[in-house]
Image (cartoon, rainbow, N blue to C red):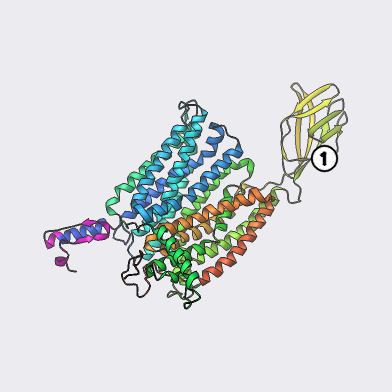
Amino acid sequence: LNPIQMLGQDLNPEQNRTLKPTSVSEFTFTFILHTITTKLCGTNYPLSIAFIVVNEFCERFSYYGMKAVLTLYFINYLHWDKDLSTAVYHAFSSLCYFTPVLGALIADSWLGRFKTIIYLSLVYVLGHVVKSTGAIPAVGENVTHVVLSMTGLVLIAFGTGGIKPCVAAFGGDQFEKEHTEERRKFFSIFYMAINAGSLLSTIITPILRGDVQCFGGDCYALAFGVPAALMIIALVVFVAGSTLYTKSPPGGNVLLDVCKCIGFALRNRWRNSSREPRRAHWLDWAQEKYSKRLIYEIKMVLRVLVLFIPLPMFWALFDQQFSILILPWLFCFLTLSCQMLNSLLILVFVPIFDMILYPLIGLCKIKFITFSNSPWKSSPMTRYLLSPALSSLLIFTCSYSLFPEVCVAARRGLTGLSVVSARFVNTLPESLNVSVAAGVDFEIREDFGVSAAKSVARGQYKEVRCNAGLKEYSVDLGLLDFGASYTIVLKEGPEGLRAFKMLDIQANDVHITWQIPQYVLITAAEVMFSVTGLEFSYSQAPPNMKSVVQAGWLLTVAFGNVIVLIVAEGAGLKQWMEFLLFASLLIVVCIIFSIMAHLYTYVSPEHRPPGDGNLPSRQLSRKQ
């Protein structure tokens, strides 16, 4: 259309903005202004994604900032024991990854993605407010704090989980069909925003809790209040860009249509398969009642969801970097440090992979995998979608089968000793009996007598009982570390009996920085795996089921955590056996997934089956 023909028509009907200029010059000016104001710096990136990325950054700051102090809040403020605190923490985390299914169904079937994000963000904000209120000592007794805290966490879980699949899919909706490369890079930027919010919140909120005093103690109300304020900012920013968004309408009750179509196909096949010719796919038995388009879209979704089945094993290993791989006595400090290291490495790796590694792979014309019956077998998109996922699984297998075993072995001593050797020298004029632990006693003769060396367990020995005739002493031996050998001289002074420790053999310690190479490999795997998964889930989903498929991708995280709970709690294996089991399972999963990926046929979501015309995806009447 030329400018004259376009006068009075919608300039961009998808965005519901109507421009009705009264002259060609006014139209030209309006058209240029529209083009400038809806694109970022003359690129093909829509301006609306800036609001979405900022919204995601603030929302992730809100979520991870609250979680950074949640366990300490349970233990120190609600006075729960460690087992209950850990159980509630993991239950909350799991709920946050199961609720995306509910948000996706609401978005695709009823409200649309834009309204779903708005309404569930309000629930999210309400949850933060209730949670912060529960951290104020003046608000009721301990029971009131528990009720408010649990109510707030449930609301937060439904809020964050509900919007999680919608925001990523809504961001992908902003790009035109031909701008696939820009959309792919958007998901990388989107993932960087997630980790930037996580990094800053993990640093800031613990400082607010520990360094700021309120109500006569640690200020949990402020530590939870700041994430609440960030969530309010996220909601305001998202609403501010509402006039720029491309808003896809909901497709009706998608889940009901899908279930009815599958049910009808199964019933029809059962009744008529013996009398009619065999059909190419079992869903084709629904063609008598449902449109080819709906059947085709269900096939797309089922193919993707089947491909997701092996993937929870990746997350089962990945989430252990913040739990099992952390030495128990340094859990609180190192967990925060490793989360910050992980987020920082992601911010570094994403641009390196996008701008250097992937283009180099393309220049070298390396083909990791091709898709059967795919019209773009040699396309670099092959590497961007599934082969990085395979590579990340292989890297992850190596990192977990090698590094943890080395670290655990080193902590226990290269000689295989997991105990400490100690002997005592008695400078007193009378014999001594030293009881270090139950069943570990040293008899030492007087006047510089030397006891036999015995093995004791590693640990802190603050009050060791010593008997010299009728006199009884208590000495502090401090830490007796893995694999070390000590000579301990006992000498009486003005303050009683004192112990002087001499180190004969150094302890077998490994510095925490030796775990950095492991986290580098894990993070490299995450960048290739997770960003790829976001883009693949969006591109392979039909337009009216994109949030549902995003929710399916997020469910792989939830089921990964379930696998960890089953193995850790139910199997009762030793730690080294758990590492070996998970590494072995992942090798099997790599093989299975590579075969599934090779058999997978990549399809364009915009493609429609031949002969379907403009049929709606709803039910077709037999009378037609």
In magenta segment, residue 21 = yes
Answer whether residue 389 is visible to the viewer in this image. yes
In magenta segment, residue 615 = no
**Residue 373 horizontal/vertical position (percent):** 46, 76
Above or below, 271 against 132 in this view is below
Tell me what residue is drawn at x 30 percent, y 57 percent. Answer: 246
**Residue 168 horizontal/vertical position (percent):** 40, 55
Tell me what residue is drawn at x 60 percent, y 51 percent. Answer: 564
Tell me what residue is drawn at x 51 percent, y 61 percent. Answer: 308
* Residue numbers of the magenta segment: 1-26
Query: Residue flagged by tag 1: what amino acid is it?
Result: Lys
Closer-to-camera residue (477/397): 397
The quarter of the picture where the N terminus appears is: bottom left
The quarter of the picture where the C terminus appears is: bottom left
Quarter occupied by residue 616: bottom left
Closer-to-camera residue (356/205): 205
The residue positioned farthest toward the bottom in the image shown: 277
Above or below, 136 against 171 in this view is above
**Residue 435 horizontal/vertical position (percent):** 80, 32
> From the viewer's perspective, is 27 left or right of 184?
left
Residue indicated by mark 1: 454
